[in-house]
Image (cartoon, helix red, strand yellow):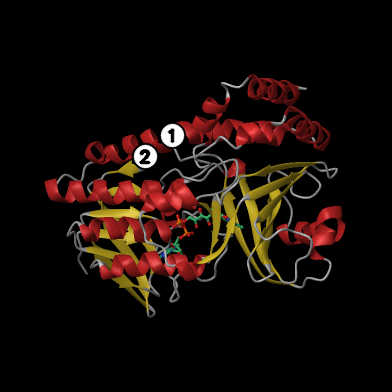
Amino acid sequence: MDSDLLIIGGGPTGSLSALKASKAGIPTTILEEHRRIGFPSHCTGHLSLTGVKRLELNVPKNIYENEIKSAIFYSPSGRQFTIRFPHPVTCVVNRELFDQHVFNLASKAGAKTFTGTYVHSLIIEKGYIKGVRVKRDNKTEEFRAKIVIDAEGVSSTILKRAGIPTSNPNLMVKGVQAIADKIENIPEDTVEVYLGRSFAPGFYAWIVPRRDGSAKIGLAAERGNPRDYLHHFKQHHPTALQRLKRSSIKTHVYHPISLGGPIRKTYYNGLLITGDAASQIKPTTGGGIIMGMTSAKIAGEVATEAIQTRNYSASFLSKYEHRWKRKIGFDMKAMKHLRLILNSLTDKKLDRLISIYSRLGMEEILKEVTDIDFQGKAFIHMAKNPRTLATALYLLTISFF
Ligand SMILES: Cc1cc2nc3c(=O)[nH]c(=O)nc-3n(C[C@H](O)[C@H](O)[C@H](O)COP(=O)(O)OP(=O)(O)OC[C@H]3O[C@@H](n4cnc5c(N)ncnc54)[C@H](O)[C@@H]3O)c2cc1C
């Protein structure tokens, strides 16, 4: 089967690339292994409102599960640091409905869609990617194209099979996401972040409330079984214990998060790599939807230009990497440094850091941040304030001892 552009994966990034190209009149096909788009959902769907607005997706109201004004960070010993905005800054979306919405937009714009279609490997001829081999209804078939966009997500199985370098395994954490009903003592518009090696080594745990009295809870850890850590968190964290004492916890879904920053190269002859497959995920928070979709939009645009000018070479497609790096490259680097510093801190140092944040009144400075996705640029803005510099210096110093 032939198409000009083939997209591997009907997740949010694949569908957005397809939407962009289809709108520009490029014959596009999405290949998705699951029959039901967005299911099973492994993700909290916590997104910045500015990021969602920038994507121009006209997200229907029923997809929003909550809007958030406030975040509380807990140190390992239970010290707190709160930041509260006068208006909502983030939202929680139903990931299954969100993925289906973007997929349907691509389909309405003209993209052909094949679900239940597992892409096994890339077809490579004379150094160019020319399509993919798929398994569908127990048969093996070939789909050919001028350009392939790989949006297969974090597993990157197809890239590994082709010998293409993928994300840094040393900064991969194992995540678990679950739904807790009947949560207590937490304001509806507040997310909670729990730091500490004993509860979530190499990352953090979270409680994100929904308007119906339930919450998405989860954590990720660099070692061990995340389900055991979640159980330990629920039973032993003094604050989580209060929040979750009457809750039953259902629907555990497991999925890795790549915190090592973007992969080294995201373009080859006839191939672009986007979203989690390119590790375009914030190394600080593990949020990949806005960063991945920002890049996926560019991938769709560059693939369109390549097909229109009939130039599928890596040198032409390198425009994609130049453009996404211009948008998010600096912030990704800054966030990776911050992640490495955070990973180096012991629980005792995290306790001290949270105290310093509260004492210096950092919440007032953080409130001035208008775009939470771009944490590198936000830091530069905040650095004008001496209190930020004092904290940064303190952070750097304690990470060395
Ligand atoms: C526990 C957890 C919580 C998270 N919470 C948040 C959050 O609150 N906010 C946020 O921004 N990010 C969050 N993330 C990250 C976010 O889920 C990802 O960044 C996002 O899903 C990336 O989108 P994607 O389209 O690149 O990949 P995916 O959403 O993984 O989509 C990839 C698609 O490709 C399909 N596919 C894979 N292999 C093949 C194949 N061989 N053939 C055909 N199809 C294939 C898959 O079925 C899937 O539909 C979280 C991640 C985890 C693990």
- Report the side of 155 relative to 172 (left or right): left
- Residue furthest toward the bottom? 137
Amino acid type at circle 2 is Trp
Placement of 317 over or under 129, stated as above or below: above
Q: Which residue has dot 1 on it?
A: 329
Nearer the observer, 45 or 4: 45
- Residue furthest toward the left? 309
Q: Quadrant of residue 7?
A: bottom left
Placement of 135 over or under 80, stated as above or below: below
Give the image location of residue 269, x and y in percent. Answer: 26, 44
Nearer the observer, 107 or 274: 107
Residue shown at 22%/69% (left/top)?
1
Residue shown at 78%/43% (left/top)?
197
Label of residue 324 in the image = 2
- Report the side of 96 relative to 128 (left or right): right
Residue shown at 58%/51% (left/top)?
257
Amino acid type at circle 1 is Gly
Badge 1 crowding class, 10 Å Cα cut-off, few under 14, some 14 to 19, many 20 or more, is: some
Placement of 362 over or under 262, stated as above or below: above
Give the image location of residue 178, x and y in percent. Answer: 67, 66
Badge 2 crowding class, 10 Å Cα cut-off, few under 14, some 14 to 19, many 20 or more, is: many
Residues tagged 2 and 1 counted as in contact (Cβ below 8 A): yes
Q: Secondary structure at mark 1?
A: helix
Give the image location of residue 332, x and y in percent. Answer: 49, 36
Give the image location of residue 327, x and y in percent. Answer: 39, 37
User: Can residue 290 be seen in the rendering of this structure?
Assistant: yes
Q: Secondary structure at mark 2?
A: helix
Q: Earlier in the sequence, mark 2 or mark 1?
A: 2
- Report the side of 189 relative to 165 (left or right): right
Q: Quadrant of residue 352?
A: top right
